[in-house]
Amino acid sequence: MVKFYGYDKCSTCRNAKKWLDAQGVAYKDIDITATPPTKALLKSILKVGDYSLKDLFNKSGQLYRQMNMKDKLPDMSEAEAISLLAEHGKLCKRPIVTDGKSHTVGFREERFSEVWG
């Protein structure tokens, strides 16, 4: 089962859901703010190698700016950064879509076509 970590008020998440629906991809909708991705999932995304640690952060989000992550992130260990992401779903770039083996972070139609098409 594909898991979709998103936020209902996010237009990017709504567009990603429309794309998945149009392709007939069934998914479990998870509110990323109430249930952030686990540390294990975040580590798995990094291990596959398609994304770097900075790619997992919602750099345009309010919480990112409030926490001054732009300045803190370069000095943070991977474990510290992953812990923050697993605690604060609003820090995560969204949506995160995963079936446990394949993952996408954010929504780019070309990438979705490659992975979920």
Image (spheres, helix red, strand yellow):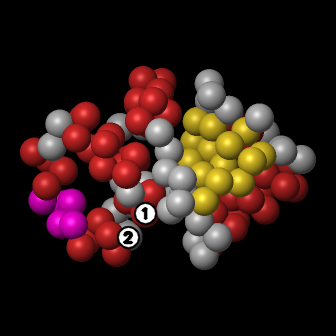
Q: Is residue 70 magenta?
A: yes
Image-quadrant location for residue 91: bottom left
Q: Which residue is the site of mark 2?
A: 61
Which quadrant is the C terminus positioned in?
A: top right
Task: Give the residue type that dot 1 points to.
Answer: Lys
Q: Is 43 positioned to the left or the right of 54 in the image?
A: right
Q: Do the residues labelled 1 and 2 touch (CB within 8 Å)?
A: yes
- In this view, the residue in front, 67 or 50, is 67
Task: Give percent across and percent down for residue 29.
Answer: 71, 54
Residues drawn in magenta: 67-71
Q: Which residue is the site of mark 1?
A: 90
Q: What secondary structure is the stretch in magenta mostly built from?
A: helix
Callout 2: SS: loop
Question: Against 90, is 40 above or below?
Answer: above
Identify the residue at horizontal 32%, vertical 70% (top origin).
63
Callout 1: SS: helix
Image-quadrant location for residue 53: top left
The answer, for residue 31, to whether it is visible in the render is yes
Count of picture labels: 2
Which quadrant is the N terminus positioned in?
A: top right
Task: Give the residue type that dot 2 points to.
Answer: Gly
Task: Give percent across and percent down for residue 38.
Answer: 47, 39
